Image (tube, rainbow, N blue to C red):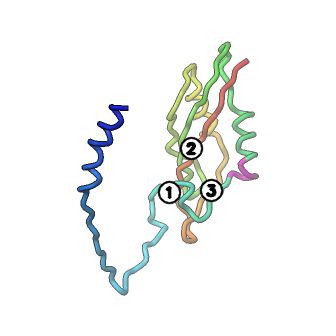
Amino acid sequence: MKPIKILLFLLIPLFGFAQSKSITVKYEENKKELDNSTDNNIYNTPGIDKKPEYPGGMMEFYKYIGKKYNTPNVKGLQGKVLVSFVIEKDGSITNIKVIKDIGFGTGEEAIRVLQNCERWIPGEQDGSKVRVLFTLPITIKAS
C-alpha cells in the first residue's frame, strides 16, 4: 500500500498546479472553403462521413483474403499479422505496412495479397473522396 500512496503523493501536485490556456481564433468572414480535390490528408475510418467499401462488402473482402492468402507450411504456426494500408481517392491500395508479423513470410504474403486486391469504393468526407487509413488483422492458424 505504501508505493501507491507515494505515487499518488507525487502525482497530485502535477494535477493541482497545472495551468490551462485558452486560445481564441478569429476567422475571416469571407474565408474560402478548402478544395478537397487537393486534400491529401489521410483520414481514420471512424472520423469520416462515408467509409470506404470493398466491392461486395467486407465479408467479400475477408473471403478474398482467406482464399488468396497462402499460409506457410510450418507446423504449429499461429498468431496475428497486422497490416495497415491507405485506400486512395481512386480506390487503389497504397502504403501497405506490416505492423505485426509472426515470421516465416507471413507479412510478405499479406502485402502480396493486398497488392493484387481490386479497387475499393473510396471513402468520402463532406462530399469529396478522401484517402483513408485501414488496419487489417489476419489470424494465422496452421494445421
Residue at x 52% of width, y 54% of height: 44
Residue 19, relative to residue 143: is it above or below? below
Per the model, the C-alpha gap separating discs 1 and 2 is 12 Å
Magenta range is 54-58
Question: Which residue is the extreme one toward the top?
Answer: 75
- Dot in front, 3 or 2: 2
Dot 2, how many residues are within 10 Å of its Cα: few (below 14), some (14-19), or many (20+)?
some
Per the model, the C-alpha gap separating discs 3 and 1 is 11 Å
Residue at x 65% of width, y 43% of height: 117
For disc 2, the marked residue is 135
Mark 3 falls on what kind of element?
A: loop
Nearest the viewer among 7 and 132 is 7
Q: Position of residue 123 (x, y in %)?
A: 59, 60
Q: Earlier in the sequence, mark 1 or mark 2?
A: 1
In the rendered image, residue 9 lying in the magenta stretch gets the answer no
Type of the residue with mark 2: Thr
Residue at x 75% of width, y 46% of height: 59
Q: Which mark is residue 43?
A: 1
Residue 123, relative to residue 113: is it above or below? below
Residue 25, relative to residue 1: is it above or below? below
Q: Position of residue 5 (x, y in %)?
A: 33, 38
